[in-house]
Image (cartoon, grey):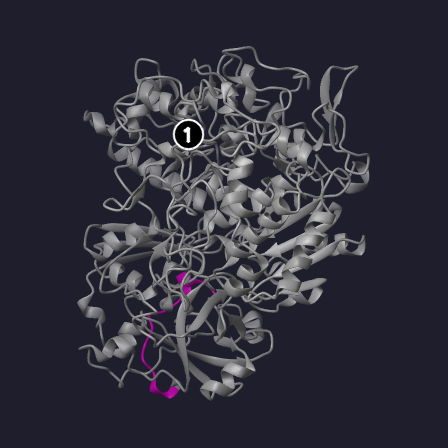
Amino acid sequence: MPGLGISFGRGGATTFQQDLKNADVILIQGSNMAECHPVGFQWVMEAKARGAKIVHVDPRFTRTSAMADLYVPLRAGTDIAFLGGIIRYILENDRAFKEYVVNYTNAPVIVSDDYADPEDLEGFFSGWDAASGEYDTETWKYADVGDMPAAGHKEVVPKGVPPKVRGLDITHRKSDPSLQHPRCVYQILRKHFARYTPEAVADICGVSPEKFLKVCEWLCENSGPDRTGAFCYAVGWTQHTVGVQYIRSAAIIQLLLGNIGRPGGGIMALRGHASIQGSTDIPTLFNLLPGYLPMPHANHDNLSEYLRINSAGAGFWSEYPAYFVSLMKSWFGEAATEETDWGFRWLPAISGDHSHMTTVADMAQGKLRGYFVIGENPVVGSSNGAYHREGLRKLEWLVVRDFALTETAEFWRTAPEIASGEIRPEEIGTEVFFFPAATHTEKDGSFTNTQRMLQWHHKAVEPPGDCRSDLQFTYELGKRLRELYADSTIDRDRPIRALTWDYPELKPGEPDAEAVLAEINGRDLVTGKPLQKYAQLKRDGSTACGCWIYAGVYANGVNQAARRKPAREQHWVAPDWGWAWPDNRRILYNRASAAPDGKPWSERKRYVWWDEEAQKWTGYDNPDFIADRPPAYRPILGAAGLDAISGVDPFILQIDGKGWLYAPAGLLDGPLPTHYEPEESVVENLLYRQQCNPRRLEWHTSSNPYHRAFADPRFSCVLTTYRVTEHHTAGGMSRWLSWLSELMPEMFCEVSPELAGKRGLVHGGWATISTARGDIECRVLVTRRLSPLRVRGRTVHQIGVPYHWGYTGRVRGDSSNDLLAFVADPNVHIQESKALTADIRPGRRGRVRRAAVHGFPARPELGPPRDIVGLRPFKQQPLQHDPAKE
């Protein structure tokens, strides 16, 4: 996860997909990779053909499970217990790659005496404030080390903190290379995970000790100087109230086993969309600027304070002013000067939580006037669709840009509340503007894929009719805003007037996408030449760069993302196919692929090494290190910035150059992963008195009730959501296509034969699934792909539901996300979609939704909406009720 102080600290996967073929063991958890990422899965199959062990851990037996050497079913929402058990196994059986751990991680570092573990505090870390519901993280620091930031951190330093460079004294931290000190990170790990025994894993996850121990042994025996293992995950890990800590758990395992920065190792974050990675690099996130630079906060009084808080005393984040100033020069050009603080005050400042779910809650409370929805269908794809629709009804205006009239665009006339009569269209005051969008085949641009690689795609055909690209829409909107404010003398309008917004146009209104890429790459403002790498960025205003991690993608004036050199003409890393950030490095932190002396750990895992004769780092990949920094280099007392990076500090964006087994900063819910039950769970937390993540985000409103299992026994099953190959995310691109709709025509649920027999469910028949929020109906698929689990002496049944269907398109069905609650991870504000409580019963829901029972009359005279004819939104006619079509 980007910028959260986890052990590798940067956004994106630490490895690249074709490198999976070099793994000796691959653990896939939180993903059905074969079905959801089939192209990337080919490299898993190639690894298997070479002899690698493939493990799949998932609540359902899927196509991935079918190709694995070992399938391990577990209860949804318990992955930290499973992974924590692996960590315990490694530590208690002395299976860690000790030379790697001692030199490349913070295992030897001594932690403050003020730190207390959940083992000591009934499930809380030290610093918990029950009144505010937050942690004071001061007690999590290293011993005798002042305030220090995590890589790409976003936390706010309170006012009154002494004005010093953060982490300047990090090179003087106390440590014990023997790993015996009781307060060193290694021993804290041992204490923290001591109770995650195979028996505890069995009682929490429903996993047999035999299968669990086999996974542990396979990982350990396939890691070390001559062998490496890889992890693959997707939203099955992220969409939890402890989602960030899931990935932290995997990072700890991979660091202990020496699998980060090495071929066949790493952690592959599988993205569910072509440019999800690009959408976080050049962000659609409320609290980040491009390249994971934190947004200013309202309590940042001035630029110097902002830079002080976000700069580090050591490592490459010490160059933060260069990244920020170059971004401002890219955006505001000649108007960004030292006298204007480089335009710092022209940026919006965060005054609180402005994440997606908070925005929807504000919308439902009437706090928003307007809303843009671009490339999203949140009514189907996000939690609690009914709450989303409630918010949309409170707006003055809504703008939707998409390929088709999605459920979000049609909320006012075809939503379940309209069909049931709870709400009448004439009662909704929201004005909806629909703009038809061009598809990816109808526009130029880049994808940044799951392995941080930018690949350029060229327009194949012109978009038909009124369809426009996102680039053209945004460009035209920006030009109109500049015209609107051209004569304004108000200071707050100055950033719009100062914005650099001139690009060559391929046709009227359509800017050249390559010109935008060149601006993102950046240039030297003195020579006018494109930047070659991010190390060239300056803090004096002499460079401009739209995203510092993308510097070099247009090196030498050439679109590096458009390169397609055949594999037969280059070696296996294929550095001339596309371009990966940063600096075209395919494996992050690859200095760790060599031993402390700079030599490869083994010939079999040779990747990057120190060339003694040339006095530089070399190898198959672009070394992710200071090119001429020798392995023997050690910083002198008081060294700062890049000079503080020693020759054995591979993790160059972490302030101390080490992989963080323990995160002393950057996270809001604890420096170590801890097993908490999901917000809604059918069992109590076996390990701690604290049931759920105490720092989770909740939204308490009558439209978003939570199920408290021990006070309400109605919802006794575990529900999890997933996707299928035939449909894509919220269905806007797949449910409108006849051939995909024919392949997967109806919303369904998967249940075990045991649950079907217990509840009277018939294969192919109808079922109604209920949660504390509402009901949906779906077809029943009775399958042994889901099996009952034994958890603490009781049988737990799980229900699986895909999330692609909605009330528009060629094929329709109830949306599973209508069942989900608004509750989120505190670090990245992501919804918990993969584990909640539910009930299931045979039969259809009926036309009267459960919400209608509470005071809203039903309108059975309204039949279901007729099918929409036509492939393009701009050709469609208004829907009309036609009884003959019912």
> How many numbered discs, if any?
1
Nearer-the-camera pick, 245 or 82: 82
The stretch drawn in magenta includes residue 757:
no
What residue did someone put label 1 on? 502
* Image location (x, y in percent) of residue 165: 40, 18
Nearer-the-camera pick, 650 or 356: 650
Of helix, strand and loop, which one carries label 1? Answer: loop
Q: Give the range drawn in magenta.
A: 871-884
Query: Does residue 801 sit above or below 221 in this rendering?
Result: below
Residue at image coords 57%, 27%:
176
* Image location (x, y in percent) of residue 817: 40, 65
Which image quadrant is residue 565 in? top right
Q: What residue type is labelled 1?
A: Asp
* Left or right: 184, with 177 as reference point: left
Give the dominant element type of the magenta stretch: helix, strand or loop: loop
* Image location (x, y in percent) of residue 207: 58, 65
Quadrant where the image shows the C terminus: bottom left
* Image location (x, y in percent) of residue 272: 54, 54
* Left or right: 437, with 338 as reference point: right
Dot 1, crowdedness within 10 Å: few (<14), some or many (≥20)? few
Residue 7 seen in render: no
Which image quadrant is residue 293 in? top left
Which image quadrant is residue 699 in? bottom left
Nearer-the-camera pick, 834 or 543: 834
Nearer-the-camera pick, 224 or 434: 224
Query: Does residue 133 sit above or below 724 in this rendering?
Result: above
* Left or right: 556, with 389 as reference point: right
Residue 569 seen in render: yes
Residue at image coords 32%, 73%:
774
